[in-house]
Image: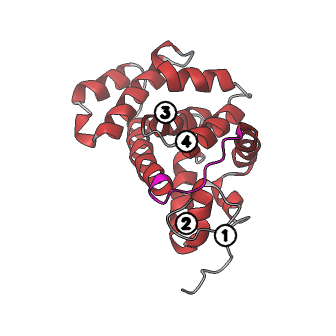
Amino acid sequence: MPHIALPEGMPGIRGAMAFRPETAKPLNELVEVLLVGPNTLTPGERELIATYVSTLNDCYYCQTIHGAIAAAHLNGDEELVRRVKADFQHADVSDKLKALLVIAAKVQRGGKNVTATDVEHARTLGATDVEIHDTVLIAAAFCMYNRYVDGLATTQPRDEALYRERGKVVAREGYVAVSKTYLPAEPVAR
């Protein structure tokens, strides 16, 4: 049961965002830039980073929805998402993405854990400065999103089919467009 009165029927971050649309707008815009916007990392790769960090943070809602969105971007490859969550070093992803996931995991533990050696290793595998930047910001942002979802004890259904269907919609339409289905056009006066 949520710690505060969140709107019914909106699990996870959607309920928290619907409760406070003024904060939802910039949060959705940030995730849109990081996970959907133009980048040399594919949306699927960026969603895998978000999913992995959410797994490390033990946020069921975020790891499940972002895993579903990642799978939707990766031609429905749910097994790849499971492998990345369990042991990305043995998953069928590029060595560059593996190096970026190492950086993301270190950010999840604390930003100062990322070393110059980690960054240089990612660069030797082809990571650009923008990819390194965005990996750090995705990891940091998802620590915030995960704590937002879990800190309010949002509802987190266990029916993976719900996440799978929602993941397809978000992958197709993006975060800002989808947020318009549950956020009012104008901020609610409190």
Q: Please identify the dominant SS of the magenta region.
A: loop
Instruction: Look at the numbered disc 1 and give the secondary structure of its residue.
Output: loop
| Residue extending farthest front | 1
Task: Give the camera-side residue of 174 and 58.
Answer: 58
- What residue is rendered at 37% in x and 32% in y? 105
Q: Residues within 10 Å of mark 2 (few under 14, many from 20)?
A: many
Q: What amino acid is labelled 2 in the image?
A: Ala
Instruction: State which tag comes first along the sequence, 4 or 3.
Output: 3
Q: Between marks 4 and 3, how big is the CA–CA gap?
A: 11 Å
Q: Residues within 10 Å of mark 4 (few under 14, many from 20)?
A: some
Q: Between marks 2 and 1, how big is the CA–CA gap?
A: 8 Å
Label 4 or label 1, whichever lies nearer to me, is 4
Instruction: State which tag comes first along the sequence, 2 or 1.
Output: 2
- What residue is rendered at 60% in x and 82% in y? 188
Label 2 or label 4, whichever lies nearer to me, is 4
**Residue at label 3?**
52
Classify 168 as above or below 14. above
